[in-house]
């Protein structure tokens, strides 16, 4: 390992430790409402992380990650709501079910490239809500499923939660749950993608032919990327279901898939650190745009224009910006003199 | 039999609307390798402009052609202002910009004209005509006619004019076209202009059927995307065939298969398309490109 690279790794590890410290202490300064908002940022963080593994690393565009989130969300909702399974245990299961769906979809997707793949995944996202409505004995139809019964009667879902001798409000508990999972999955992605797997994925993105001729098993790795990415989306969907305490077909609308891709682009394709910016962007831009004007339609105009401006100013996302700042810095430290 | 024929004709009419928007999507894809998600909203916005002109006392056809002209200018301007600066960015980034345009145009229409649905005058009478015992509406035939004529004119332009040739060259090989003197940047803008005209056309055709409101084109856009993939993203003829096939097919399925009805129309459409893509990954008429390192 060169000195340059060791410095880079050291910098990232210290940034990671600092970020975890800030995340652990943050709820002390947040109101209950803000804590719930920031939990949603954590959930989007996980979903965008997954999408970025697929789109940023292997270059397969997905416009249907909302559908994988829906699969995860419904897995949790059915297990908790219909079979009274403890919500925590359903999270990894939801990830696995969505991951399996991702692997299954990844196989036929091998034949498609570029925007055909994007539109095929978009088709899944478009087709899912009506299908969820149709098979109502399983999914609760357009009513959806209440995870903890009707909260007006049971109060469950909003009560305080006791964990490890601590009593937390539901929103604070949600915050720690979402961000613990987010931090673990981030570290996992960082460890996986920093090594051989990440190199393989990037090789596929940059040139499939060159990757194949260097001995990369293309179908295996492309499908694997789909599976891993869908796993992340499924975990995010499960958290989303727990956070909103119910699911229905409108919980995971078509635009969610578009928002996730917006998040991944704002994050910077292929950048893990930028994902935080992408998650903050999709959670806070709508309310920010709402401040501009109260008249109907004006917030959407502000949203669209802001989105276009951000992409025009930062075509390579927050990750591209970090690189632009970071490179001169490390270069100036390691300048040969 | 009568019901069958009627469903086919009304399917062809809605298919014609999908087809014109699908051709618009294909035009932009061919020249810039980007799916324009704002295509439907551009058409919706221009339909509002047309209604504004008609309410201002313009005769229908004057407003119709004035709107098409404005749509052309608007499309060219959009390409110059928002798309050109990020030409070299990855295609996903450009797709995101078009999503931004979708949101902004939808909001702008809400802001300016409000969210209530309005009726939009039809160029054709809805009076039914009877052919062999089956009642067809003149409007259906009018819509089919207008869509097909527009696409045919575009075909003539691409096939027989110098500008059309330059446009095709710029889409096929930008580097080489630039070397032989084609102004590639302006050709792309021209492509956006034509696409915008087709969008406005499908907006004005669909508005009398579904009433005009800012969300009018949502569904149409989804079917047009489906039609474009079905036919092959780089084949305008494929988009026309895909649009018509989709219109007729969906009408027949939702009439004759009870299980599908109206609710599962969209999933069925997309399931069929996924099936087609698995057999022909570049759509029915799309060119399969050889990949190189």
Image: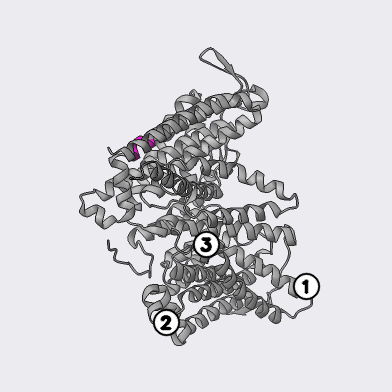
Q: Tell me, yes or no, if residue B215 can be seen here.
A: no
Seen from the viewer's position, the closer of residues A233 and B18 is A233
In x, y percent, where is residue B22? 50, 68
* Residue B47 belongs to the span the image colors magenta: no
- Disc sitting over residue B55 in the figure: 1
Task: Judge if badges 3 and 2 mark residues of a common chain.
Answer: yes
Location of the N terminus of chain A by quadrant is: top left
> Circle 1 — which element?
helix
Q: Which residues are magenta?
A: A189-194
Residue A7: name its quadrant: top left
Q: Which residue is painted at 66% across and 48% down in the image?
A: A289
Location of the C terminus of chain A by quadrant is: top left
Cα gap from disc 3 to disc 1, whole angstroms? 30 Å
Say which residue label 2 marks. B181
Q: Are marks 3 and 1 in contact (CB under 8 Å)?
A: no
Which of the two labelled residues, at mark 3 and mark 1, occupies the earlier sequence position? 1
Cα gap from disc 1 to disc 2, whole angstroms? 45 Å
Which of the two labelled residues, at mark 1 and mark 2, occupies the earlier sequence position? 1
In x, y percent, where is residue B28? 49, 69
Chain of the residue on which disc 2 is drawn? B
Residue A40: name its quadrant: top right
Seen from the viewer's position, the closer of residues A191 and B106 is A191
Which of the two labelled residues, at mark 3 and mark 2, occupies the earlier sequence position? 2
Q: Tell me, yes or no, if residue B97 can be seen here.
A: yes
Q: Is residue B209 above or below residue A280?
A: below
* Residue A192 belongs to the span the image colors magenta: yes
- Of tags 1 and 2, which is closer to the observer? 2
Residue B42: name its quadrant: bottom right
Say which residue label 3 marks. B223
> Circle 2 — which element?
loop
């Amino acid at each position: 390992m060169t000195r340059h690279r060791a410095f880079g790794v050291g910098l990232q590890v210290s940034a990671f430790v600092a970020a975890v410290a800030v995340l652990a202490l943050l709820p002390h300064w947040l109101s209950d409402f803000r804590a719930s908002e920031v939990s949603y940022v954590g959930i989007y963080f996980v979903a965008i992380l997954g999408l970025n593994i697929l789109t940023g690393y292997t270059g397969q565009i997905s416009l249907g990650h909302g559908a994988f989130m829906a699969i995860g969300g419904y897995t949790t909702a059915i297990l908790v709501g219909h079979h009274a399974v403890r919500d925590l245990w359903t999270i990894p299961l939801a990830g696995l079910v969505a991951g399996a769906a991702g692997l299954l979809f990844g196989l036929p997707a091998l034949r498609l490239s570029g925007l055909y793949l994007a539109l095929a995944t978009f088709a899944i996202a478009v087709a899912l809500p009506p299908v969820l409505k149709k098979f109502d004995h399983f999914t609760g139809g357009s009513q959806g499923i209440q995870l903890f019964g009707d909260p007006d009667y049971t109060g469950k879902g909003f009560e305080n939660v006791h964990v490890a001798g601590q009593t937390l409000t539901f929103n604070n508990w949600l915050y720690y749950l979402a961000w613990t999972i987010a931090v673990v999955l981030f570290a996992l992605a960082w460890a996986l993608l920093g090594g051989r797997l990440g190199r393989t994925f990037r090789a596929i993105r940059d040139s499939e032919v060159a990757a194949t001729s260097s001995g990369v098993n293309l179908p295996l790795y492309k499908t694997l990327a789909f599976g891993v990415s869908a796993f992340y989306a499924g975990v995010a969907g499960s958290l989303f279901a727990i956070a909103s305490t119910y699911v229905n077909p409108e919980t995971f609308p078509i635009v969610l898939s578009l928002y996730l891709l917006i998040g991944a682009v704002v994050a910077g394709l292929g950048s893990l650190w930028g994902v935080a910016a992408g998650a903050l962007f999709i959670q806070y831009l709508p309310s920010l745009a709402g401040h501009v004007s109260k008249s109907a339609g004006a917030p959407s105009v502000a949203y669209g224009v802001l989105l276009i401006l951000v992409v025009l100013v930062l075509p390579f996302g927050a990750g591209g910006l970090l690189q632009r700042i970071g490179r001169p810095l490390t270069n100036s430290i390691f300048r040969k003199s | 039999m009568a019901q069958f024929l009627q469903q086919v004709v009304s399917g062809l009419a809605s298919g014609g609307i999908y087809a014109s928007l699908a051709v618009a999507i294909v035009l932009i894809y061919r020249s810039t390798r980007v799916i324009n998600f704002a295509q439907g909203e551009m058409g919706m916005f221009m339909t509002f402009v047309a209604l504004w002109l008609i309410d201002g006392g313009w005769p229908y056809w004057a407003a119709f052609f004035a709107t098409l002209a404005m749509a052309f200018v608007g499309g060219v301007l959009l390409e110059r202002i928002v798309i050109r600066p990020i030409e070299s960015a990855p295609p996903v980034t450009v797709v995101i910009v078009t999503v931004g345009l979708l949101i902004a145009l939808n909001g702008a229409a809400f802001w300016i004209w409000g969210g209530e649905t309005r009726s939009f005058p039809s160029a054709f009478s809805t009076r039914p005509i009877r052919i062999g015992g089956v009642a067809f509406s003149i409007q259906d035939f009018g819509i089919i006619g207008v869509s097909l004529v527009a696409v045919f004119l575009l075909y003539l332009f691409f096939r027989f004019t110098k500008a059309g040739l330059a446009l095709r060259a710029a889409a096929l090989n930008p580097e080489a076209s630039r070397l032989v003197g084609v102004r590639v940047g302006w050709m792309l803008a021209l492509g956006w202009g034509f696409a915008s005209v087709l969008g406005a056309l499908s907006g004005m055709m669909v508005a009398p059927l579904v009433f005009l409101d800012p969300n009018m084109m949502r569904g149409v856009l989804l079917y047009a995307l489906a039609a474009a993939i079905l036919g092959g993203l780089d084949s305008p003829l494929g988009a026309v065939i895909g649009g018509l096939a989709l219109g007729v097919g969906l009408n027949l399925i939702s009439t004759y298969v009870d299980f599908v009805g109206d609710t599962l129309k969209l999933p069925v459409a997309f399931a069929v398309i996924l099936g087609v893509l698995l057999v022909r990954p570049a759509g029915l008429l799309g060119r399969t490109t050889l990949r190189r390192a």
